[in-house]
Amino acid sequence: MGERLRPYRVLVGSRMRSQTTYRRSFVSDLLGSVAIGLMEFAEVYVVFANVDVLGDLDFAAAALVFALANVGFSMADLLVGHADNLPVYLREGTLDAFLLRPLPVLAQLITSDVSLRRLGRVAVSVVILAVALPLNDIEWTAAKVALIALTPLTATAVFAGLFVCAAAVQFWLVEGSEFTSAFTYGGAYASGYPASIFSLPMRLLFTFVVPAAFTAYLPVLVLLDLPGPPGTPHWLGWCAPLAAVAVWAVALLGWRAGLRHYTGTGS
């Protein structure tokens, strides 16, 4: 197993070293990522500066939703977000080189890059999570401890699966990154807010089509013992791992279908 993973470790290691070679540039990028995370949370803060409750959640609960969703998305963006580069690889014929190597193409794509600057956004989300948890009145049980530990991992898996789904669609669209971003980055934005603020069709979209609600909102309802809005009862928060499995099942089926559809550039 170690020998099979060695090519990926070498590739990822080289990418990481190349980004940290110029330290001032790396620190600048890292601080920029921190600033983005802070600005996104500032948006939530400004909303609750004008209202006490939004979607049946107060500021502390909304901060917990934001933190959990952003930990998951920022980790998925760090690990898999560069799958957005697939349209470039398709146009330039870079994917043909992936096909020539005796390694899974998806694994090569995932390890083709890693943006360490995104660690800044991860750090901001983790700090907000650490502050928001004690602010909420949670009756802790063994099940809830397991849920809060599992939720960031599940959220990462869901968003990573969405990135792979978006990449798979590019085999047919080629220039469809703007379309797929509506579901990846749009889902990430929607996940940072209570799903109850959306209309029923939008709530169903971001729960059962793009399972953004499973990354934070529904688990938080379970943690706080709050009922869910119509169409999304709170007990669905326990089903977040199933949502992650479903997303990855669709992602892998779509990826395989797209790879079979790909005919190469002739380069």
Image: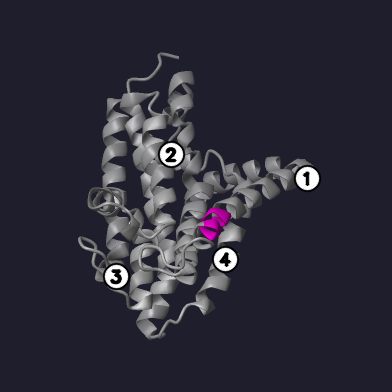
Task: Please tell me which residue is depicted at 55% across the width and 52% down the height of the picture.
Answer: 40
Can I make out residue 78 in this image?
yes
Label 1 to label 4: alpha-carbon separation? 26 Å
Q: Quadrant of residue 224?
A: bottom left
In the image: residue 148, left or right of residue 38: left
Q: Which residue is mark 1?
A: 23
What predominant SS class does the magenta segment belong to? Answer: helix
**Labels 1 & 2 near each other (Cβ < 8 A):** no
First to last magenta residue range:
41-46
SS for callout 3: helix
Residue 42 x %, y %: 58, 55
Image disc number at residue 128:
4
Figure quadrant of the C terminus: top left
SS for callout 4: helix
Residue 1 x %, y %: 46, 55
Disc 2: CA contacts within 10 A as few (<14), some (14-19) or many (>=20): few
